[in-house]
Image: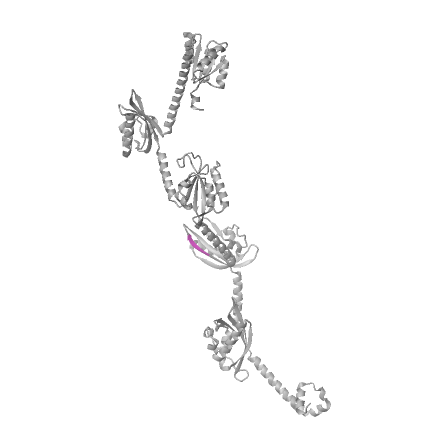
């Protein structure tokens, strides 16, 4: 409804004479502000009053059924202050008295001539105006009571002649006094010294220039409280001069504090390294701090009131991120307060480089003066450069992958126990050792159940000692996996200080294969040391061969200890000639990459602990050597030398026996040759030995 509509006056005219009612309507509506509806009876008038309440009722007195006085009484039951004018042709003091008693607003007697309509129109306008002003005054009074009762506003009046202030209850509360009246000098004394001149000058201007003034001041109230006040002053002019100054005082302490906070916030936003945007309900930028502009090389004027989505599209590398950004902004601007937008990461390309920013979305309260005018919804977007963090996360993820792979390769897992929280944390590697899924949850007591019953109590005891006394432990124990397989593990634990509490950390490593290899090595070592063959290991590097290790049989055979042999070349041990021959064998083994067997003949002096089995001063050995490759290169040779003196002795003995047999055969052949010649034809001599003998003697 416009102001002109509110200024119009709607009139309901009730008269049982339709013609007179129409005439009255015609004359009244000549007034620009009056609009008249007619009714021909009190009942019809009551219905019109219910359907569309007027600003004023004009009623005749003499009407059939319900007269004007009864009509008035009925109207007053529901509309106590509605202007009601009794416009009647019958006039008497008794009727006027009854009408006044019933609550009539005005009483006017019908006359001849058009002047009566002008008079009626004036009475209508005056009555309606009086009612409206009364209602306005009531509303203002109620409003003043409400503001006073709110405790942050009060009214006051200054008597210019006496300099005395009259204070409303709200003003007294703000000034911290119970006095209804106060000298203006006392009020000025309550103001901070640096504000007194400003307040005094404002009062003087109101009195001298006769115009309204406003000012603010800080107040040290009589109750020792401190406030910021907003003061409004208006002159009351009588006979051309200002006799009073009336005004209102409002407590703006909280507002000032809020302004100070906002100023601090803005200073903070300008100083932080994060980019900050404030976006309104139309998704336009209403604020951008300096950092946000520096990130993309723009100025405040270039982004002010500009749509943010095109800006994001322009500088973002990944279009998927733009869609996520827009969805998060939509959620933040929605009325669904329970929904909180998820952070959005965008890779921004600007200045020839790419950076990753994490965007957080927060709804901004527009009830404060924190955003621009005309903004009823706003979202603050804080963009933090997380490029370094993302790189660290990637490095951490790689480290985790490496740790997980290392745990699998080394068959190891770690754990941590917090005694205060009674909480244990297991890595995936430890859970795998127990034969569990890496994502499994496992309590401390459940973890102990995987250890062999014969080892469990011993492990628990060491664990408790570690918690209580800080005694570290390391022990080999058996684990029975979830599938029943038994494995050997090394269990280790030690107490460490972590922030304000102490925890126990440790690891479990599967050493089953190591145990088996160790047993194999121990068996090999026993075999190496106790075999009767002479075993040796030769290191090869840069075409040089040196002794690494020999067994006890070798030491016994040569009379040389490991310490005497270790690090020596064959030439240093056996002389240049023999040493060179040995090295040639070694070199042949390295070059061909194949095993090699050969016999050696030594004089007794070279083998002090061996005597010649043949009496010729010689000792016989048979050696077998094999290359050992590491990464494609032969870096050592392993060999075994067997004492074949007994074999040589038997071979010589067999040879002597064969020779004696041959001699016996020849002698016997000579004595019986004649007989053989007569009885054995030459062509039947098949024995090579006989053939040779016959050939020598007779040409057989």
Which image quadrant: the N terminus? top left
> Would you say residue 608 is visible in this rendering?
no
When asked about the image quadrant of residue 380, the answer is: top left
Q: Position of residue 93 (x, y in %)?
A: 41, 7
Residue placed most toward the observer, 62 or 448: 62
Residue 637 lies, in percent from the top left, at: 52, 71
Image spot of residue 56 (x, y percent): 44, 16
Above or below 220: residue 317: below
Residue 540 appearing in the image: yes
Observer-nearest residue: 463 or 439? 439
Q: Quadrant of residue 691?
A: bottom right
- Image position, residue 542 (x, y; %): 47, 71
When the figure is inspected, residue 137 is found, relative to residue 336, above or below; the finding is above
Residue 587 part of the magenta-drawn span: no
In screen coordinates, is 149 left or right of 54?
Answer: left
Give the tally of numbered discs. 0
Region in magenta? 493-497
Residue 53 horizontal side relative to residue 681, left or right = left
- From the viewer's side, name the closer residue of 368 and 443: 368
Quadrant in which the C terminus is drawn: bottom right
Residue at 48% across, 41% down: 328
**Magenta: predominant secondary structure element?**
strand
């Amino acid at each position: 409804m416009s102001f002109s509509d509110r200024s119009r006056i709607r009139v309901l005219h009730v008269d049982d004479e339709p013609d007179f009612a129409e005439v009255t309507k015609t004359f009244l509506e000549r007034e620009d502000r009056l609009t008249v509806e007619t009714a021909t009876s009190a009942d019809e008038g009551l219905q019109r009053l219910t359907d569309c309440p007027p600003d004023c009722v004009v009623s005749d007195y003499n009407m059939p059924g319900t007269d004007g006085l009864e009509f008035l009484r009925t109207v007053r039951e529901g509309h106590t202050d509605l202007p009601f004018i009794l416009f009647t042709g019958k006039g008497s003091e008794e009727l006027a008295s009854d009408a006044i008693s019933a609550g009539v607003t005005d009483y006017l007697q019908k006359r001849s001539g058009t002047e009566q309509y002008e008079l009626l129109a004036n009475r209508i306008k005056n009555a309606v105006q009086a009612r409206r002003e009364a209602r306005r005054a009531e509303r203002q009074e109620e409003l003043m009571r409400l503001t006073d009762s709110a405790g942050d506003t009060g009214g006051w009046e200054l008597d210019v002649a006496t300099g005395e202030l009259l204070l409303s209850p709200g003003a007294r509360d703000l000034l911290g006094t119970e006095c209804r009246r106060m000298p203006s000098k006392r009020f000025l004394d309550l103001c901070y010294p640096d504000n007194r001149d400003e307040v005094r000058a404002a009062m003087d201007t109101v009195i001298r220039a006769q115009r309204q003034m406003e000012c603010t001041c800080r107040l040290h109230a009589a109750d020792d409280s401190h406030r910021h006040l907003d003061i409004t002053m208006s002159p009351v002019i009588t006979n051309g001069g200002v006799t009073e100054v009336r005004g209102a005082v409002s407590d703006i302490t909280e507002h000032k504090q809020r302004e100070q906070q906002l100023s601090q916030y803005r200073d903070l936003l300008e100083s932080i390294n994060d980019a900050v945007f404030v976006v309104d309900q139309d998704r336009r930028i209403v604020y951008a701090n300096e950092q946000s502009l520096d990130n993309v090389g723009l100025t405040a004027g270039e982004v002010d009131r500009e749509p943010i989505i095109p800006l994001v599209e322009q500088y973002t590398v990944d279009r998927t991120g733009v869609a996520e950004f827009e969805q998060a902004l939509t959620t933040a601007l929605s009325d669904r307060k329970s929904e909180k937008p998820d952070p959005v990461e965008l890779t921004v390309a600007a200045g020839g480089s790419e950076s990753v920013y994490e965007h957080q979305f927060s709804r901004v309260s527009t009830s404060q003066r924190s955003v621009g005018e005309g903004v009823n919804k706003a979202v603050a977007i804080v963009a933090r450069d997380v490029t370094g963090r993302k790189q660290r996360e990637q490095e951490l993820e790689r480290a985790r992958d490496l740790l997980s792979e290392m745990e699998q390769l080394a068959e190891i897992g770690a754990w941590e126990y917090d005694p205060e929280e009674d909480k244990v944390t297991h890595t995936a590697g430890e859970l795998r050792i127990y034969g569990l899924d890496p994502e499994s949850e496992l309590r401390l007591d459940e973890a102990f159940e995987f250890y062999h019953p014969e080892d469990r109590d011993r492990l628990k005891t060491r664990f408790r000692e570690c918690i209580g006394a800080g005694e570290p432990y390391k022990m080999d124990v058996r684990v029975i996996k979830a599938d029943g397989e038994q494995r050997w593990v090394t269990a280790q634990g030690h107490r460490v200080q972590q922030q304000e509490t102490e925890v126990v950390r440790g690891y479990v490593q599967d050493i089953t294969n190591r145990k088996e290899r160790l047993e194999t090595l121990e068996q090999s070592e026993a075999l190496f040391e106790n075999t009767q063959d002479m075993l040796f290991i030769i290191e090869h590097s840069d075409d040089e061969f040196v002794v690494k290790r020999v067994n006890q049989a070798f030491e016994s055979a040569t009379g040389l200890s490991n310490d005497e042999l270790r690090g020596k070349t064959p030439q240093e041990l056996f002389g240049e000639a023999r040493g060179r021959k040995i090295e040639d064998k070694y070199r042949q083994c390295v070059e061909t990459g194949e095993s090699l067997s050969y016999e050696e003949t030594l004089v007794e002096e070279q083998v002090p602990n061996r005597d010649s089995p043949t009496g010729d001063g010689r000792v016989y050995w048979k050696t077998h050597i094999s290359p050992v490759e590491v990464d494609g290169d032969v870096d050592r040779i392993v060999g075994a030398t067997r004492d074949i003196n007994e074999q040589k002795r038997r071979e010589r003995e067999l040879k002597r026996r064969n020779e004696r047999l041959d001699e016996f055969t020849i002698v016997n052949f000579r004595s019986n040759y004649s007989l053989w010649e007569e009885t054995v034809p030459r062509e039947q001599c098949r024995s090579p030995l006989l053939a040779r003998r016959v050939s020598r003697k007779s040409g057989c």
